[in-house]
Image (tube, rainbow, N blue to C red):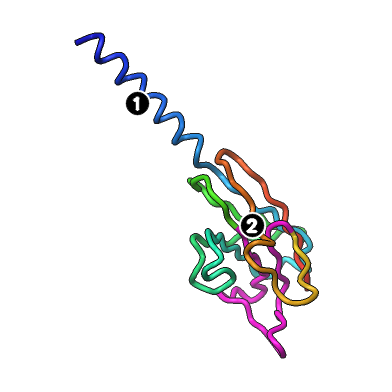
Amino acid sequence: MRTLLFPLVLVFALATGASAQSSGKLSVSVTGVRNDSGSVRCGLYSSADGFREPGREMRGAAAPIKNGQATCVFNAVPAGTYAVAVFHAEHNETQMETGLFGKPKQGYGFSNNPSSTFGPPGFASAAFAYKGGALNLPVQLSY
């Protein structure tokens, strides 16, 4: 019985350690916020399907702004491929507002800081591999 119990305990310990390492804390450090009004809202997306669409994010987070910076934090994120979309909710709005031709009225940004000169980036441009543990992603807002 003792011979059988030890391998089971070892397998359980290895499985627990592997799952603890495969999820963790993902922080999004947002810079370039033009003022400290409102908050910064971040959406974490796990696929191209619904990327940048309100309500289609895997998780959402809001962060207060101090000195033109904010940090959105996502806890217990499993390992995988993700993309982040961010906007400055200057008046605490819950969705990004757009103007003529779909141009955002607020500051916005994406993981990997891809160019948005010719329109918003797709999931592939903003995607990153997350292996678990602690990761800090820098995002620079554009207005």
Q: Amino acid at mark 1?
A: Phe
Is 64 on the left or on the right of 61, as rendered? right
| Nearer to the camera, 63 or 19 | 19
Q: Which mark is residue 12?
A: 1
Q: Is residue 11 above or below residue 133?
A: above
Quadrant (top left/top right/bottom left/bottom right) for the N terminus: top left
Provide the secondary structure element on which disc 1 rests.
Answer: helix
Residue drawn 57% across the image and 68% down it: 51
Rendering quarter of residue 86:
bottom right
Is 116 on the left or on the right of 63, as rendered? right
Q: Amino acid at mark 2?
A: Ala
| Nearer to the camera, 90 or 98 | 98
| Nearer to the camera, 111 or 29 | 111
Q: Which residues are magenta?
A: 83-112
Is 36 on the left or on the right of 77, as rendered? right
How many numbered marks are there? 2
Q: Is residue 96 magenta?
A: yes
Residue 15 pos. (x, y %): 40, 30
Rendering quarter of residue 98:
bottom right
Rendering quarter of residue 92:
bottom right
